[in-house]
Image (tube, rainbow, N blue to C red):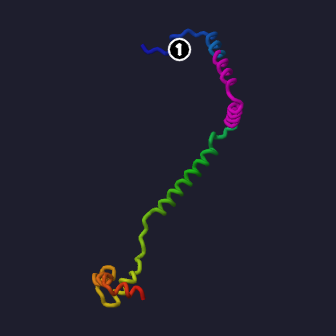
Amino acid sequence: MNTHPTDRLPMDAGADARFDAAIRTRHATALAQLSPQVRAQLAQRRVAALRGEQAGARRHRLRFAVAGFAALSALALGVRLYPQEAPPAAAPASTQLANSTGGSLPLDEDPDFYAWLGSAEAPRLAME
């Protein structure tokens, strides 16, 4: 029972012409409602299409340039924020002093140093 849609309709050339005229009238009405800028753009695009130019080829190049710049910026930001290995720092002066005097602990960890700071001699020595 599959029938083609054109099999059910009678062939009427007058109906086709009326349909075509109605569509053309609606198209003309729609074009009249467009702004002059839009009509100019449509005319330019029609001329470009008739010449065989690709629509938007220039925009694609700009998009690729913007995407490349964004990728490069993201890479630069990633390199900038990536935690880098710190070079081994030289030993603090207090550690070098403790090691040179034969002490086994650095000054900031030596309990005798803190005991000396709390003694009565420390303010007097600091004044000198």
Task: Give the residue at mark 1.
Answer: 6
Is 120 positioned to the left or the right of 25 in the image?
left
Q: Look at the image and tell me in which quarter the N terminus lies.
A: top left
Residue 34 colored in magenta in the image: yes
Is 21 positioned to the left or the right of 100 in the image?
right
Q: Position of residue 91 (x, y in %)?
A: 38, 81
Residue 70 colored in magenta in the image: no
Q: Which residue is at a point 54% across and 53% down the rendered structure image?
A: 70
Q: Quadrant of residue 22?
A: top right
User: Mainly helix, strand or loop, the magenta region?
Assistant: helix
Residue type for callout 1: Thr
Q: Look at the image and tell me in which quarter the C terminus lies.
A: bottom left
Is 51 positioned to the left or the right of 125 in the image?
right
Q: Which residue is at a point 67% across and 38% down the rendered structure image?
A: 52
The residue closer to the viewer here, 36 or 86, is 86
Up-down relation of residue 46 to residue 98 (above or below): above
Q: Position of residue 36 (x, y in %)?
A: 71, 30
The residue closer to the viewer here, 109 or 29, is 109
Q: Position of residue 27 (x, y in %)?
A: 65, 21
Task: Spot the residue most to the bottom.
Answer: 101
Label 1, residues with CA under 10 Å away: few <14, some 14-19, many ≥20: few
Bounds of the magenta span? 22-49
Q: How many marks?
A: 1
Is 123 positioned to the left or the right of 54 in the image?
left
Q: Which residue is at a point 67% across and 27% down the rendered structure image?
A: 34
Up-down relation of residue 55 to residue 77 (above or below): above
Where disc 1 sits, the SS reads helix
Q: Position of residue 84 (x, y in %)?
A: 43, 68
Q: Quadrant of residue 15?
A: top right
